[in-house]
Image (cartoon, rainbow, N blue to C red):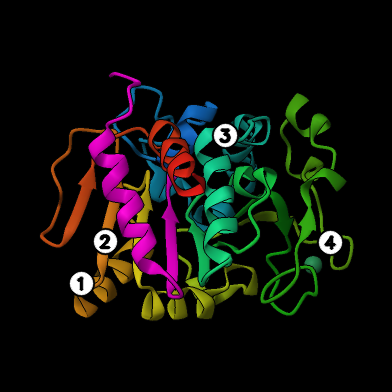
Amino acid sequence: MSQAVDAGQVGHLVKALRQVGEGHLVVITGAGISLASGIATFRGTDPDAIWQKDVTELGTFRYFQHDPVGSWRWYLSRFSQVLGAQPNAAHRALVDLERWQLQRGRFTLITQNVDTLHEDAGQQELVKVHGSANRIRCPREGCANGAPEGSLPRSDFDVEAFLARPETERLPHCPLCGDILRQHVLWFDEYYGEHRDYQWPRVQEAAWSADLMLFVGTSFSVGVTDLFLRQGLGRGIALLSIDPSDAAAPMAGLEVLNAKAEVLLPAVGRHLQG
Ligand SMILES: [Zn+2]
């Protein structure tokens, strides 16, 4: 695919963004935005989509309870790639877009990604609705290191011994109650409201108050995009999606810009600042 910027797409997006004015610009990002940082998509069609198999079974609390060693091995293999990655031009352009929009109105970025690339790039108005790869937490109900508010930095726990010999007793344990710690991510058999860090009330408010929704690199396969599409279509606001794949727009009312976000967004930023 060409890296060339499509001037028509740039002009179209610039116009839509300027029309938000004092309103609320809401950006929703998915795995596609981190692809250019070397992170394989959750279940995309790229050949490296390492989670394509069994993801809805492995990414569950049920699986963690049944086989904590297997759950941890799976996540550590995934997160070694995630936590070593660097933000790309699309992440940086969204920081510039936030700064630009906050001079006139509201801005919220909601990401489905658990990597840390948005915050590493400097994003401020950020909601990590699926949790974060750089934190872990206690699964025990009522423990202060777990839901609804608690979590711990992953970097506080050394997993080298576990990786060398994966056994239950070598897994990180809760300093308060001794339970085996879990990933601080939303699993398929869990709810958005389970942990404050997912900021579900803020997500709902953003869906209700958005004047423009800009989707970046999302495959529209998880619940949170349904909420935004439903709300956005119902209220008749502009819905734009930046997607490099050739997949057709899944529905009327959603306009797909067939482009790479790391190419299109910086070009849009140059026009907005200019
Ligand atoms: Zn605990």
* Picture coordinates of residue 36, whole percent (x, y): 48, 28
Amino acid found under the numbered disc labelled 4: Gly
Q: Residue flagged by tag 3: what amino acid is it? A: Arg
Q: Where 225 sits versus 74, above or below? A: below
Magenta-drawn segment: 1-30
Q: Position of residue 49 (x, y in %)?
A: 39, 30
On whether ligand 1 comes within 8 Å of the CB at mark 4, the answer is: yes
| Mark 3 to mark 4 CA distance (whole Å) | 25 Å
Front residue (pair 145, 244): 244
Q: Residue at x 72, y 53 (%)?
A: 135
Badge 4 is on which residue?
A: 178
On screen, residue 189 above or below 111: below
Mark 2 or 3: in front is: 2
Q: Residue 244 at what x, y percent from top left?
A: 29, 33
Residue lying at the far left of the rendered structure: 252
Q: Which residue is mark 2?
A: 239
Q: Amino acid at mark 2?
A: Leu
| Residue at image coords 48%, 43% | 269
Residue 233's disc number: 1
Where residue 78 is drawn, which disc sits there?
3
